[in-house]
Image (cartoon, grey):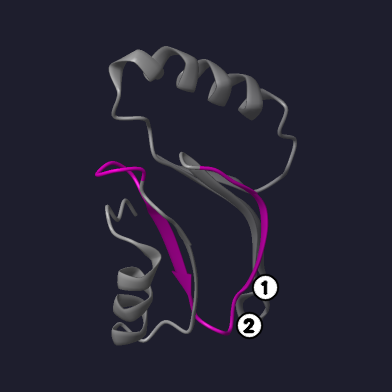
Amino acid sequence: METKQSSHSIKNRRRQCGFHKGLTVDPIGRAGGLCIWWKPSMEIEFLDVTKNWIDAVVKVPSDSFYGRCTWVYGTPYNNEKVEFWETLKAWGVKITFPGWLWVI
């Protein structure tokens, strides 16, 4: 989710919501900021984390779930949009992982 808040603020909110684990990417100025929270029953291996996406392999042993998830936050700046989508497109074509989910 886009946070627009610092890691410290998000960490407190995460705990209030009952999530024990999390990753936060701080915003740049007043734009962006990403976070992902998960319960202890999940295993997450982060493959790539940038200001615009979080890419991870997610395992939920109790449900026998294993898959790759990429959460994407498109740039809010018009002058960065073409480069952002071209980079994402080129990057995504290289992925050959079964069970891959994009969240945009």
Q: Residues within 10 Å of mark 2 (few under 14, many from 20)?
A: few
Residue in the foreground of this view, choosing between 57 and 101: 57
Q: Which residue is mark 2?
A: 62
Snapshot quadrant of residue 62: bottom right
Q: Looking at the image, do the residues carrying marks 1 and 2 touch, with CB atoms under 8 Å apart?
A: yes
Residue 91 lies in the magenta stretch: no
Q: Residues within 10 Å of mark 1 (few under 14, many from 20)?
A: few
Q: Amino acid at mark 2?
A: Ser
Identify the image quadrant of the C terminus: top left
* Alpha carbon distance from label 1 to label 2: 6 Å
Residue in the foreground of this view, choosing between 99 and 21: 21
Q: Up-down: is 84 above or below 61?
A: above
Tell me which residue sits at (32%, 80%) in the image.
12
Label 2: state its secondary structure.
helix
- Magenta residues (range): 28-50
Q: Please give left or right for residue 79 compared with residue 95 in the image.
A: left
Tell me which residue sits at (45%, 70%) in the image.
37
Q: Please give left or right for residue 67 compared with residue 69 in the image.
A: right
x and y, in percent, of residue 4 in the image: 27, 52
Residue 30 lies in the magenta stretch: yes
Tell me which residue sits at (29%, 77%) in the image.
13
Tell me which residue sits at (63%, 19%) in the image.
90
Q: Up-down: is 76 above or below 65?
A: above
x and y, in percent, of residue 38 in the image: 49, 74
Q: Up-down: is 104 above or below 7?
A: above
Identify the image quadrant of the N terminus: bottom left
Q: Which residue is mark 1?
A: 64
